Image (spheres, rainbow, N blue to C red):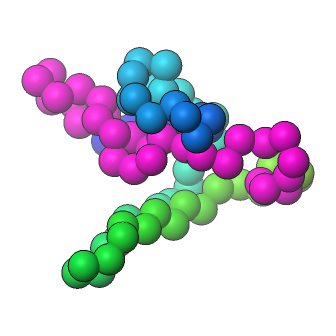
């Protein structure tokens, strides 16, 4: 499976082909949800040598997977 990570604006809430990119190389991730709670995504990425939360950087992202099934294709997992 191939995973994609695209930095986006907070208003970019519609998933599309422009989000099928590797803005950050994801080393590992953990997607979890407690019953009745919100889902959380923990992502491990290489240090970009500038703060991930620095002013001017995008702080929202789409995380998606290529299912390799033609009927589904690339589907979003998390925003």
Give the x, y percent position of residue 47.
78, 56
Residue at image point 39% right, 22% down: 16
Q: Please determine whether, in this image, residue 65 is positioned above or below residue 18.
A: below
Residue at image point 34% right, 39% down: 76
Q: Foreground residue, 15 or 48?
A: 15
In the picture provided, is 33 more to the left or to the right than 13?
left
Q: Quadrant of residue 51?
A: bottom right
Q: Which residues are magenta?
A: 51-79
Q: Residue at the bottom extreme?
A: 35
Q: Please determine whether, in this image, residue 18 is positioned above or below residue 74.
A: above
Q: Quadrant of residue 22?
A: top right
In the picture provided, is 70 more to the left or to the right than 46?
left
Give the x, y percent position of residue 48.
80, 49
Would you say residue 59 is visible in this rendering? Answer: yes
Would you say residue 25 is visible in this rendering? Answer: no
In the picture provided, is 23 more to the left or to the right than 11?
right
Looking at the rendered image, the quarter that the N terminus falls into is top left
Q: Please determine whether, in this image, residue 56 is positioned above or below residue 73.
A: below
Q: Residue at the left extreme?
A: 71
In the picture provided, is 40 more to the left or to the right than 1?
right
Q: How many marks?
A: 0
Give the x, y percent position of residue 4.
47, 37
Does the stretch in magenta take in 72? yes
Give the x, y percent position of residue 65.
34, 40
Q: Foreground residue, 38 or 70?
A: 38
Q: Foreground residue, 19 or 3?
A: 19
Residue at image point 56% right, 50% down: 26
Residue at image point 71% right, 54% down: 46
Q: Residue at the front extreme?
A: 11
Does the stretch in magenta take in 35? no
């Amino acid at each position: 499976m191939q995973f994609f990570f695209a930095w986006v604006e907070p208003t970019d809430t519609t998933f599309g082909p422009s989000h099928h990119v590797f803005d950050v190389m994801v080393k590992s991730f953990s997607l979890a949800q407690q019953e009745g709670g919100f889902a959380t995504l923990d992502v491990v990425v290489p240090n970009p040598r500038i703060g991930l939360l620095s002013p001017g950087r995008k702080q929202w992202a789409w995380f998606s997977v290529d299912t390799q099934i033609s009927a589904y294709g690339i589907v979003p997992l998390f925003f």
